[in-house]
Image: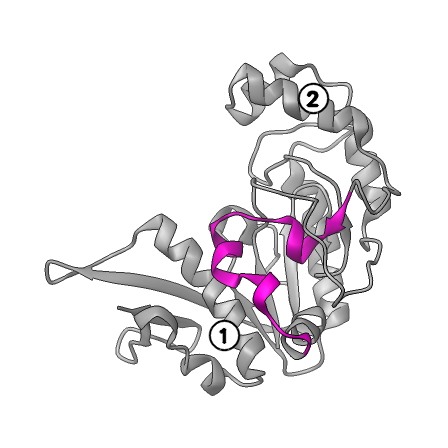
Amino acid sequence: MKIITSPAKLMNVENSTDLLRSTTPKFIEEAAFIQSYLKHKSPKYLSELMEISPKLADENWERNQKWKAKPTAKESAPALFAFTGEVYRGLDAKTLDKNAVDYLQKNYRMLSGLYGLLKPSDKVMLYRLEMGRHFEFDQYKNLYEFWREKITEQLNSEMKKGEILLHLASNEYGKVIDRKKLNHKIIDFDFYELKDGKLKTIVVYTKHARGLMVRFCAETNAKTLDDVKAFNYEGYLIDEEKSTDTKLVFTR
């Protein structure tokens, strides 16, 4: 079983761990190629591309100038600990034990607009490049065009026959996987809140729940779909009626 999530815009490379020996991302040369174009983009361009304030654009322009393929330990952190957005608050990696972290190293991957596909131990620097942004470079119209085949092939190469892929990424990131060419069954997820007798999707809760699900799989050493269906953190329970062969629905 493999699990994927989106990365996060919020990052902190001061987060370190003794539970993982740091590794170099599989697609570090591709990341360097993207950065060779990104670093020449002005703060104004970044502000418009990413729809961010001039202050944030300046900050990310500086990050692009400092980025390197072989960062020092001080300049980088393992991806599992570097991302700090809502998914990663739910995952809360720093409170996991060695067995759970080992499980994630084997089974969990993070999608990334810059790095493509990351293992928990892969060293990343501070960056911002969302997969869905209309970033044109070289002969590529966007990042999907650049990454789709590479990421899909890499997932195929890492997965054994009959393994399933738990898709806990956002639609923006999940679209980078070519479902027709992935040789494995993909399981999608929905998380709903019961409010005033109606089921509602609340984005921040959904992101948090995705992280909780990753944590649950790691803490329970989940191996099968039935193991995953037992997810019950923070009041969520499987809704068997709404779930299908390819989508699990959890409500609370």
Residue 205 seen: yes
> 7 left or right of 116?
left
Stretch in magenta? 76-98
Crowding around mark 2 (Cα neighbors within 10 Å: few <14, some 14 to 19, many 20+) is: many
Contact between labelled residues 2 and 1, with CB atoms less than 8 Å apart: no
Q: Nearer the viewer, residue 109 or 154?
A: 109
* Amino acid found under the numbered disc labelled 2: Trp
Q: Nearer the viewer, residue 210 or 140?
A: 210
Query: What secondary structure is the stretch in magenta mostly built from?
Result: helix
**209 vs 185: above or below:** above
Q: Which mark is residue 216?
A: 1
Q: Which residue is mark 2?
A: 61
**Marks 1/2: CA distance?**
37 Å
> 35 left or right of 200?
right
* Amino acid found under the numbered disc labelled 1: Phe
Helix, strand or loop at mark 2? helix
Helix, strand or loop at mark 1? helix
